[in-house]
Amino acid sequence: LFWPARGNHAKMSGNCSPDLLWMLVRKNNAFMVKKDMGRIQFSKEPYNLTNQNSFKFSGLCNSKAADIQGAENGVVLGIKSQKGKNSPAKLYKTTKCARDFTRDFRRVAKCIKNTVGGYYRPDLSRAALTRWTKFHRSLKITAAKKGVAKK
């Protein structure tokens, strides 16, 4: 949240409670995707492992959140840093888990389990491992399709 300050610059409020932030953004935000069938609400926000619109998985409201993304030559595990909450440029830390992630499934899973489940947020370790498993399966399917097309 940005609050107006004196002069031409804006001051970031880093002392806002996560519960207050959740109350402000839970029903309306730019990342929300509402489906007509039932009461299902999804979220496209970064650092949301399950894409559910809930406080536990919210990347906007929680001071600690994790994300898994594929890079051009590896897998990147991103976490929110506690030291960077007053400076947005230092808010996110990224760790490259493996170079050849098509073969190193266990190595990446161990990196995720030790980082997210070990000391950062143990309640997100299962969701992070699930996301990695689905990501890895999708890579296998695309690699198989490319191999068939070349022959």
Image (tube, rainbow, N blue to C red):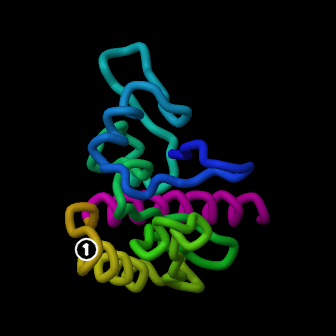
- Could you say where residue 75 lies in the image, as x and y percent from the top left? 55, 74
Identity of the amino acid at label 1? Answer: Gly
Q: Nearer the viewer, residue 16 or 46?
A: 16
- Could you say where residue 110 lies in the image, as x and y percent from the top left? 33, 83
Residue at the outermost left position? 123
For residue 138, above or below residue 28: below
Residue at image point 56% right, 58% down? 141
34 vs 39, left or right, is right
Q: Nearer the viewer, residue 121 or 102?
A: 121
Residue 128 position by quadrant:
bottom left
Residue at image point 54% right, 74% down? 76
* Residue indicated by mark 1: 117
Main SS category, magenta section: helix
Residue at image point 49% right, 31% down? 29
Q: Nearer the viewer, residue 49 or 140?
A: 49
107 vs 101, left or right, is left
Q: Secondary structure at mark 1?
A: helix
Residue at the outermost front position? 6
Residue at the outermost right position? 150
Residue at image point 36% right, 37% down? 53
64 vs 86, left or right, is left
Tell how many labels: 1
- Could you say where residue 99 lies in the image, as x and y percent from the top left? 59, 85
Q: Is residue 31 shown in magenta?
A: no
Q: Is residue 146 shown in magenta?
A: yes
Q: Quadrant of the C terminus?
A: bottom right
151 vs 37, left or right, is right
Residue 27 position by quadrant:
top left
Q: Is residue 69 visible?
A: yes
Q: In the image, which residues are magenta?
A: 126-151
